[in-house]
Every structure is written in C-alpha cells, then in structure tokens.
Image (cartoon, rainbow, N blue to C red):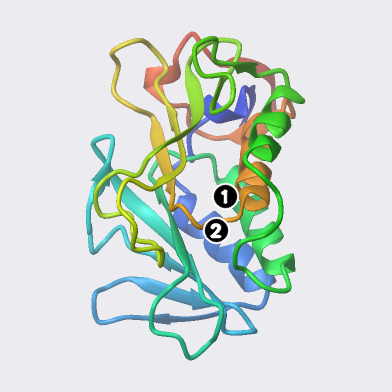
Amino acid sequence: MYWVTPRHLAGDDDALAERIGDTLADLGWRMWPTTRHTLLYVSPNGLCGAEWILAAHPFELGGLPVAWQLSARRDADSVVAEWNAYFTTGVPYEALADLLFALDAHETPDAGIAGSETVLAALTARGWHRDVDRPRTTATDPGFSSWVSLETLPPLIEDADPRLDLVGWQAWAEPALGAPYLWCASFSASVPHDLVAEFASSLASPVPVPRRTLPQSAEGRLTVVRRS
C-alpha cells in the first residue's frame, strides 16, 4: 500500500465503482441494476441519483469513458433532471465521495446562492494558482498538471436550462503536456457552485491518499509519503 500526494494525480486505484458504491450505501441510497447493465442509486429523498454507467459506455470525455453520472431534480416526480455531472475512470474517488457527502447534506439539490468565485477560492486556499489569462474562471495546481475551469459545455452534457452556449465547470488531469488525460469531470451549467467547490477542495487536498496501484502516466509527478 502506498500513501501518495498529490491527490489529483493519484488515480482511482481501479476501485472507483466499489469505493463510491460503498459511500452511497453508507449514506442510505437505494440501489438496483438496470436493463442497460448499469447500477442506479437514488437518495432517500428521491431527489438525487448516481449511476455507474461504465458498462453502457454512453460517451467519452477527453477520450476516457464516463463511469459515474450524478443528477438532481427539484421534485422526485420530475422526469427532467435540473443538472448532471459526469466523471470518467481515473478520477480520485475521495473527491467524488466528498462531493456526494455535500450533495446528500443539501436540503434541496438545485441551484444555491454561492457564486463561481466559491470554486476558485476553494482551490486557491489549497495552494492552486489562478490562470494568468483567465483568473476569474480557471485555476491550476502548482505543477500545471490539473485544471478546474468554467468552460462552454462539451457535447452530450445535459442540463434543464435549454439555452445554447451555456458554461459549466470542467476539470481534468493531464500529467504531462500532450499526454493522455488521466481523468476528466464535467458539471452541467446548473450544478450549484458550492457543490463544485467541495469537489475542487477535496481534489486539491494535500492529505496523502492510499493506493495499491499508481497510474503510470503520473510517474515522476507523485510523491510516495510512506508505504504500509
């Protein structure tokens, strides 16, 4: 077992399904398999959903298959989700788990009052730097290997807001310039900024995380704090 930093380059230890599934079970979310060979979890209040969709392979972000999709509704009977968030394989499961804890604690999962500055403030508090050219929308880690940025939404990102050219938070890790992405995450336009801030703050946490396997693409960028 390795204990490594930084978290945003630690990968998912090939355990993203199990770790997040355990988190959702601990939160009391109900689960059942679907006909699409996915696993659907629903929060106790029926307003939030989390679905392991890797087997269905609906689409990719940055060339990586989307593994988890989160969604939220204002009303449990609503057919259309207010917002969605998507996470590929390789995303550090600690950051996704912390997002789920924050989502589960929300009385209502729709848009909050926090502004976009909340996300950037969470990152700079962890030592990340604002982009020189886009200081109000983008931040990167000190090693310039991971980014969180308010961008035009990629294709297939669903949101209840029908307007074109919407922007939403995008996050990704590129361990070396021009290398394949280690992971990507996409938040649709209506995801509350405070929820994205929870994900971003956890992503940038300096606390070492345990891993049995380390991503090859991050070799030389990870620090092994100790072995156990």
Q: Relative to residue 12, is residue 97 depicted above or below?
A: below
Q: Residue at x 32, y 71 (%)?
A: 38
Q: Nearer the viewer, residue 193 or 5?
A: 193
CA separation in Å, label 1 and label 2: 8 Å
Number of residues whose C-alpha sits closer than 10 Å to that of mark 2, classed few (under 14), some (14–19) or many (20 or more): some
Q: Residue at x 48, y 27 (%)?
A: 214
Q: Quadrant of the N terminus?
A: top right
Secondary structure of the residue carrying tag 1 is helix
Secondary structure of the residue carrying tag 2 is helix
Q: How many marks do you count on the picture?
A: 2
Contact between labelled residues 2 and 1, with CB atoms less than 8 Å apart: yes
Residue 125 spot, x, y in % from top left: 77, 25
**Horizontally, is 124 left or right of 93 in the view?**
right
Residue 146 spot, x, y in % from top left: 49, 23
| Amino acid type assigned to the residue bearing label 2 in the image | Ile
- Residue 20: image tag: 2
Q: Residue at x 40, y 67 (%)?
A: 160
Residue at image mark 1: 96
